[in-house]
Image (tube, rainbow, N blue to C red):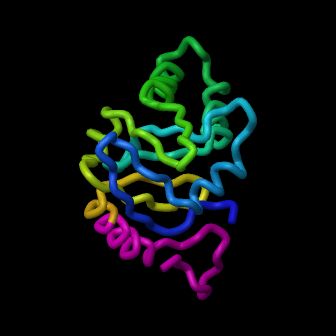
């Protein structure tokens, strides 16, 4: 698989390490560019969770910034929002990472985490918050019509 699928719960050990699910590690390794970090962790703009981006996917976020005047307030704001709280991350031989304190606080993490696959990225949640998020997403997704659907076709992703 080349995308992140499923929700997986793991405990944070006494040293603050958590194991990335094996399937997620496989996707990350398959997308890693030599010389780049395995992934980039950053706080979500909209949710109390951590986003985990394969490094190549995270690098693509810079492309829209290149279209802005690099001395403009808009460029500075977007660059700060994307990069100032981003942490390049590699795992140890056992596939574990240490989540920076700032990100743990943002997501309300304590002794366990839920890894939630979102296709091209994954998120790291406090487990009860992840459960609530998935339930809300399932309800709201019933109202979603995908672009390109004609009237009368199945429209949602439930």
Residue 74: percent from the left, percent from the top? 49, 23
> In percent of the image, x 59 and y 54: which residue is there?
25
Please indicate whether residue 106 sits to the left or right of residue 31 in the image.
Answer: left
Residue 48: percent from the left, percent from the top? 31, 48
Q: Quadrant of the N terminus?
A: bottom right
Q: Quadrant of residue 5?
A: bottom right
> In percent of the image, x 29 and y 67: which residue is there?
132
Magenta stretch containing residue 32, yes or no? Answer: no
- The boundaries of the magenta stretch are 131-158
Please indicate whether residue 148 sits to the left or right of residue 7 in the image.
Answer: right
> In percent of the image, x 45 and y 24: which residue is there?
84
Magenta stretch containing residue 151, yes or no? Answer: yes
Please name whichever residue, 40 or 157, is drawn nearer the observer in this view of the structure.
40
Residue 39: percent from the left, percent from the top? 57, 41
Please name whichever residue, 14 or 125, is drawn nearer the observer in this view of the structure.
14
Q: Is residue 98 above or below residue 113?
A: above
Main secondary structure found in the magenta portion: loop
Q: Residue furthest right?
A: 34
Please name whichever residue, 125 or 74, is drawn nearer the observer in this view of the structure.
125
Q: Is residue 157 above or below residue 97?
A: below
Please name whichever residue, 121 or 152, is drawn nearer the observer in this view of the structure.
121
Residue 102: percent from the left, percent from the top? 32, 33
Label count reads 0
> In percent of the image, x 26 and y 39: which residue is there?
105
Please indicate whether residue 53 sits to the left or right of residue 98 in the image.
Answer: right
Q: Residue furthest top?
A: 71
């Amino acid at each position: 698989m080349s995308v992140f699928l499923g929700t997986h719960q793991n405990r944070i050990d006494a040293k603050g390490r958590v194991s990335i699910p094996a399937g997620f590690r496989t996707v990350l390794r398959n997308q890693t560019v030599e010389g780049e970090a395995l992934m980039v962790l950053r706080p979500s703009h909209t949710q109390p969770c951590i986003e985990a981006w394969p490094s190549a996917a995270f690098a693509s976020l810079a492309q829209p910034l290149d279209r802005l005047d690099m001395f403009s307030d808009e460029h500075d704001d977007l660059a700060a929002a994307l990069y100032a709280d981003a942490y390049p991350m590699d795992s140890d031989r056992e596939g574990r990472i240490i989540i920076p304190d700032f990100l743990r606080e943002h997501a309300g993490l304590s002794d366990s985490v839920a890894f939630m696959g979102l296709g091209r990225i994954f998120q790291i949640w406090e487990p009860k918050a992840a459960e609530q998020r998935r339930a809300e997403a399932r309800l709201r997704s019933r109202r979603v019509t995908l672009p390109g659907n004609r009237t009368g076709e199945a429209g949602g992703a439930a």
